[in-house]
Image (cartoon, helix red, strand yellow):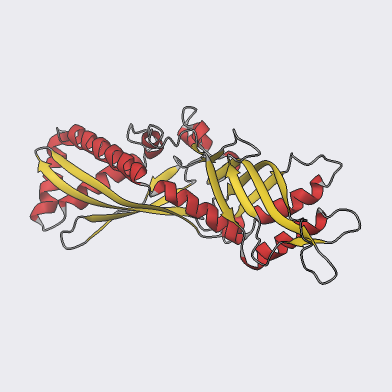
Amino acid sequence: MIKDSIHAELKSVVDSGGSALEFLLLKFQAKANDTTSPYFLPLLLSGLSNPQIFPALTVNQWEFSLTGFSGEQMAQNICAMTAPFGQVQQPTSSTAFPDIVLGKSPQQPVGVAQVQGLINATFGTPTISGPGQNIVSVGIQFGAWTQSQVGAKLQPGLAPGGAALSLSGTFAITQSCCLADASNNCIPGSTNNQIGWGTFTMTFGSKTAGGAVNVTGSAVSTVSVVSMQPPQVAVAVSQIQLVVADLSQMNATVDVTSIPIDQHREQWNTQAGKALNDPSAKQNIIANINAVLGSPSNLTAIQTLLESQMNAYLKSLFG
């Protein structure tokens, strides 16, 4: 009876000039956002294996420099605070910016960086465009579900403390310095690297300062209906991208464990915290996450997952 009803509903849409594809996508979207459904999106995403994002996405290393005015200030601060007693120390050049490594580094060869919360997502209403009316764009909201809503099995994949996402692991900051003479020139042979390393955690707040959704995303795919008996689709995902609306809601805490507590660790923690909380560092982190999300292996894994699960659902729905 239910199958007869859904067939009649689809026929009515098509007969009235509506889109069969849109009808099928909306049916699947409802199931993907239903916590009781076997097609619940966090549950589906928890099964990805290339890359694996449950309980977290693990990366070996992300490296970038903190440039611009903030980089200049940070470079000067690190060199000044590590200068030998009674001497002046400065960056080796105007472009000797702090180098930041998240994850594995020479100082922490078994270090990692992990992004938690990528399974905690919902699909927005799909929109269809293009000459063939088969280009499908879908908004994504991260941090959409609470621990109690997803149940014990999926809870390890959610960021702690109600955050939309979290990034944690090991880090190292390297700054090239030199001793300076009275004219602020580097003294020959005095070049040295000042290095601090330790652990960090960065949370991505689920709401902006104004209370709106903070961490969102978008996915673009080509979706074609390849059969109607029962309806089946072919999916090719071309883009997945994450967006953070309010960078001020990304907050990092650090501990520079390489520096003894009684030997300027507090000063190092202050400078390292400023570095990771700088907007340019946050933009670099978002860009690195997007490089993983938009990688060929991830796009292939997502389209394989969506195509197989959507077709399984449609087969169960239409018989």
Viewer-nearest residue: 53 or 44: 53
Q: Where is residue 296? Give x, y as percent.
A: 33, 46
Q: Quadrant of the N terminus?
A: top left
Viewer-nearest residue: 211 or 217: 217
For this orientation, the residue located farthest to the front is: 188
In the picture, measured across the screen, residue 246 lies left or right of residue 98, that is left
Q: Where is residue 175? Give x, y as percent.
A: 69, 54
Viewer-nearest residue: 245 or 14: 245
Q: Quadrant of the C terminus?
A: top left
- The structure residue drawn at horizontal position 41% and vertical position 47%, both measured from the top left corner, is 293
Count up the numbered dots.
0
In the picture, measured across the screen, residue 113 lies left or right of residue 241, that is right
Residue 209 appearing in the image? no
Q: Where is residue 17? Give x, y as percent.
A: 11, 58
- The structure residue drawn at horizontal position 14% and vertical position 41%, both measured from the top left corner, is 231
Viewer-nearest residue: 93 or 278: 93
Residue 299 appearing in the image? yes
In the picture, measured across the screen, residue 221 lies left or right of residue 151, that is left
Indicate the quadrant where residue 312 lies.
Answer: top left
For this orientation, the residue located farthest to the bottom is: 183
For this orientation, the residue located farthest to the top is: 153
Q: Where is residue 2? Give x, y as percent.
A: 17, 35
Indicate the quadrant where residue 311 lies.
Answer: top left
- The structure residue drawn at horizontal position 43% and vertical position 50%, both measured from the top left corner, is 291
- The structure residue drawn at horizontal position 28% and vertical position 40%, both measured from the top left corner, is 306
